[in-house]
Image (cartoon, helix red, strand yellow):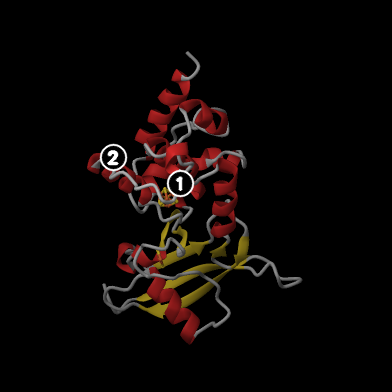
């Protein structure tokens, strides 16, 4: 399909500029083989409009910076081929649910930092592991593999934008928050008990607020097992009430 002329319909708005109004602007670009939305955006910025705002760092699906809504679905621009869209019209919007920096750029970093502080998303070592001279015990390889699986989250924010519960209730921690809690709950080095985690996510803003709409799991670019982990946490939290 290379050689086509693509139309990019892009959300433009700079909240820093007084008087600016949100609008959709069309850009035309010649498609090249293997073109991703990220490559196309770079061409547009370099060749047509240097004021176009969007984020990227790695170009390889690792940093999570380039997430945006492409033809209605939140996903990573650097992992989305333009060939996926047969009619050649590609609509780009910023991720909803995050502070807008400008155009397609949103402040996911601020959201993730606040989430980490609110849910205390760091290892709370057991007392005997707090001495830095204490030799660390090797981790069971199976546990390490399970932890690694959850550590694959790139904090792109796609699951937050794809979650209707989160869009309706801003205080909901979202799949990314619960995946991170699941990661520490699994970690045998963490001193926190199921009761401690219950006080953080055993409520409507956490595991009991999820309506299992599956937007997170269906759109996560890392194919993380949100539903399995949320169901596990829910059972664990419910068992602390018995
Ligand atoms: S869980 Fe998936 S969709 Fe959500 S922030 Fe992590 S990588 Fe992105
Ligand atoms: S630029 Fe890093 S994930 Fe797309």
Residue at image location 34% in from the left, 67% down from the top: 60
Q: Residue furthest right?
A: 18
Gap in angstroms between the C-alphas marked 1 and 2: 23 Å
Residue 175 circle label: none
Of marks 1 and 2, which one's residue comes earlier in the chain?
1
What percent of the width, then of the height, locates residue 108? 54, 57
- Give the answer, above or below, for where 141 lies relative to 10: above
What percent of the width, then of the height, locates residue 101? 62, 65
Q: Residue furthest front?
A: 133
| Residue nearest the observer in this picture, 103 or 187 | 187
The residue singled out by tag 1 in the image is 131
What percent of the width, then of the height, locates residue 78? 37, 67
Query: Quick check: can you spot residue 87?
Result: no
Residue 143 circle label: 2
Q: Residue furthest top?
A: 242
| Residue nearest the observer in this picture, 55 or 86 | 55
Residue at image location 45% in from the left, 74% down from the top: 41
Residue at image location 61% in from the left, 38% down from the top: 169
Image check: 191 left or right of 217? right
Tell me the SS state at disc 1. loop
Residue at image location 69% in from the left, 67% down from the top: 15
Query: Quick check: can you spot residue 125?
Result: yes
Q: Residue furthest bottom?
A: 47
| Residue nearest the observer in this picture, 107 or 54 | 107
- Residue density around tag 1, few if under 14, some if 14–19, many if 20 or more, within 10 Å: few
Tell me the SS state at disc 2. helix
- Give the answer, above or below, for where 74 lies relative to 27: above
What percent of the width, then of the height, locates residue 197? 51, 31
Location of the N terminus by quadrant is: bottom left
């Amino acid at each position: 399909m290379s050689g086509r002329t693509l139309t990019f319909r892009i959300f433009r708005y700079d909240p820093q500029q007084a008087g600016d109004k949100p609008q959709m602007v069309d850009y035309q670009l010649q498609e090249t083989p293997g073109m991703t939305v990220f490559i196309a955006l770079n061409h547009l910025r370099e060749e047509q409009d240097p004021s176009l705002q969007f984020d990227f760092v790695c170009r390889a699906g690792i940093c999570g910076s380039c997430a945006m809504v492409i033809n209605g679905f939140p996903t990573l621009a650097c992992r989305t081929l333009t060939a996926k869209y047969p009619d050649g019209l590609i609509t780009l919007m910023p991720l909803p649910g995050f502070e807008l920096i400008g155009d397609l750029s949103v402040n996911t970093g601020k959201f993730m930092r606040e989430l980490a502080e609110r849910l205390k998303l760091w290892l709370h070592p057991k007392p005997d592991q707090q001495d830095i001279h204490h030799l660390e015990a090797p981790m069971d390889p199976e546990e390490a593999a399970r932890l690694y699986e959850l550590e694959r989250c790139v904090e792109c924010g796609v699951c937050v934008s794809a979650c209707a519960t989160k869009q309706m209730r801003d205080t909901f921690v979202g799949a990314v928050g619960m995946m991170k809690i699941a990661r520490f709950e699994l970690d045998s080095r963490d001193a926190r008990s199921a009761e401690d985690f219950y006080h953080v996510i055993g409520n409507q803003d956490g595991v009991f607020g999820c309506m299992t709409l599956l937007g997170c799991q269906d759109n996560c670019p890392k194919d993380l097992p949100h539903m399995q982990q949320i169901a596990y946490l829910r059972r664990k939290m419910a068992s602390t009430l018995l």
